[in-house]
Amino acid sequence: MRRKIVAGNWKMNGSLKSNEALLDALKKASIPNNVDVIIFPPYPYLIQAQMNLQSSAIKAGAQNLSISEGGAFTGEIAGNMIKDIGCNYVLVGHSERRTLYGETSAIVAQKTAAAITQQLTPVLCIGETLAEREAEQTQNVLTEQLQAVIEHCGIEIFSKLIIAYEPVWAIGTGKTASPEQAQAVHAFIRCFIAKSDAKIAALVQVLYGGSVKASSAKALFEMPDIDGGLVGGAALDATEFTAIISAAS
Ligand code: PEP
């Protein structure tokens, strides 16, 4: 039985003051027993979230990490620093990192390995663009993104990470994949992993991300291969995010 996860990606949003209000509101929410909740604030606010959430079931993680362990890498953040402040999760390969910052699947695979080395749980984001979907390349794109991780890290790593399927055309656009569209891709992802290891494929949690709202969450989360959501915009609104958490119960 896979637990549900609702994760909130705050992207480059927030301030000390607005975060405090959001965190306080989230802490008041009742978290269903079968749901894990993780938020991903920007780096400067990670310790704020981590400290604020100490007595809460909600966890905090980082949005990115370096492939390097430390040293002369200006502007980078090492996995051991994320671990050092008590966080256990990190996003890798978010589509904004892939498209805006040139992260190739090979780099994402190295970041996945770097996270595991520091005993962080990576949330490995994968997904196709609209042009790729329209060209019926979705499965090929996902295969390439997953294969890079398998080749660099080995299939066993999929027992230590979470996958987030995020169709790029649905991120921040207000266009959510229908539950059936998302389920079809989630089933493909699970089948693809099962070709290498059926046991790992049955256990790996695969989240859906892309304009998830309280109104769309329940139908998505009821699909057999959807184990929760990675939420962007709606994670900045306590009422909306709390309702999405409830929809996962
Ligand atoms: C995301 O940033 O991972 C995301 C899914 O964003 P949104 O929910 O705003 O589409």
Image (cartoon, helix red, strand yellow):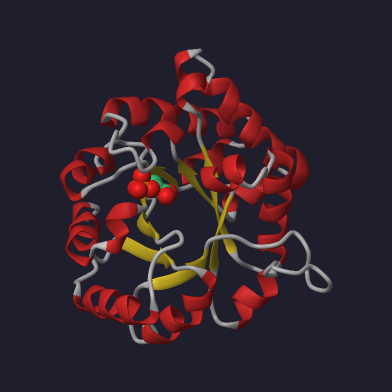
x and y percentages locating residue 210 in the rendered image: 36, 41
Seen from the viewer's position, the closer of residues 215 and 174 is: 174
Seen as rendered, the residue at the extreme top is: 135
| Residue 85 place in picture, x, y as percent | 57, 82
Q: Is residue 196 visible?
A: no
Q: Residue furthest right?
A: 72
**Residue that appears at 78% across and 69% down:** 69
Is 182 left, or right, of 151 in this rendering? left
Looking at the image, is 66 positioned above or below residue 192?
Answer: below
Residue at image location 79% in from the left, 67% down from the top:
73
Residue 156 visible from this viewpoint: yes
**Quadrant (top left, top right, bottom left, bottom right) of the C terminus:** bottom left
Q: Which residue is drawn at the image coordinates 33% and 38% (left, top)?
A: 173
Residues 174 and 121: in front is: 174
Above or below for 68 versus 211:
below
Residue 231 horizontal/vertical position (percent): 35, 52
